[in-house]
Image (cartoon, grey):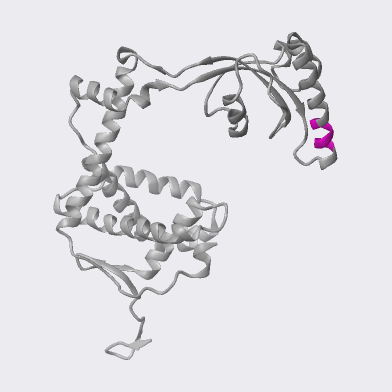
Amino acid sequence: MAAGAEGTPTSAPEPLYATVNGKPITQKEFYGAYNGYLRQKFYHGQIPDDQLAPAKKEVSDRLVDRVLLLDEAKRRGLAADEPRIAQTIAEYEARYATSAAWQKSREAMLPGLKQQLTEQDLLRQMEAIGHTIAEPGDEAVREFYKTRIELFTQPEKLRLHTILLKVDPSAPKTVRDAARAEAARIVTNLRADGGKFEELARLHSHDRSAEQGGDMGYLHRGMIPEPVQAQLDQRPLGAVGDAIDVLEGVAIFRLDERVPPQVMAYQDVATRARELLKRDLSNQAWQSFLSGLRKTAVIKLVEQVPPAPAAATK
């Protein structure tokens, strides 16, 4: 603690993470944002070591961009949408009307809440400005369709029949082994007389396709588990594959038809192509807008920042 001019203790300044055009970003702000980012993106557990640096850079960039955007909003003379802010505060008031804690701290919290909502509204306006693009012409849309044809290509489709012997994931190994042995016997019978597949599917399968004789209809590549897809890739039409473990148990598949990838006609996807192009152009405009703000900014990162608190990587 330091003492003020009249002997009143004053708080030590917050350690800095960076300054942007002279405005401070404290280490507390950085690690608060960093922890929130980790909780959102890596909620399942520990962040991989090779993603620590990219995560910190993304959070750092966001904080820097926030300062730059608010500066630009001020330079442009933008005003926050006061009715929108008042409505949001009214909603807070209604939600916490019976909260003793809210009533006690309301007067102290309202100024900070209003400031936060004001900044959020200005950032919303700046994002709308930064994403603004001209409507692309028909030729540009058609060129996008040609150069990104993979976006307008229906993937390969496979028509399959299956027999599923259901095994609960928590079942002991002996239960799965028994299902594997039963599936092997069914495969032997099917290969001896392929005409029995539909009959055996109705008799043994626990898949919802059992009533249709195991007919699963058409499935796109990517909808099929990788081990199953790998097996099917090696099988000719009409062949019955070996029994294979799947999430639901043990399954047998027969490949009935293979429909190759099909490019959709431009006239059938022109509207979608236009929307995808506009999305790409809008994102490019936004990145260019941010880059322009950074070019004229003075951004200083603190050379030595202590490691993140332990909670940040949990």
Residue 177 vertical placement versus 164 (above, below)? below
* Quadrant housing residue 142: top left
Task: Using the image as rendered, state which of residue 87 and residue 169 is in the foreground.
Answer: 169
- In the image, residue 309 above or below residue 6: above
Which residue is at the front of the view, 114 or 135? 135
Image point (37%, 16%), residue name: 264
Tell me the quarter of the image containing the C terminus: bottom right
In the orientation shown, which residue stands out farthest toward the top? 195
Percent coordinates x, y for residue 27 in the rendering: 37, 70
Residue 9 position (above or below residue 304): below
Residue at 50% from the left image edge and 47% from the top image edge: 95
Say left or right for 27 vs 144: right
Which residue in the rendered view is the most extreme toward the bottom?
7
Residue 81 is covered by the magenta coloring: no
> Magenta residues?
175-180
| Residue at 42% from the left image edge and 65% from the top image edge | 31
Tell me where residue 257 appears, x and y as whole percent: 57, 13
Image-based side of 306 in relation to 148, left or right: right
Residue 210 is drawn in which quadrant?
top right
Question: In terms of secondary structure, what is the magenta stretch mainly?
Answer: helix
Quarter the N terminus occupies: bottom left
The picture places residue 64, in percent across and down from the top left corner, at 28, 59
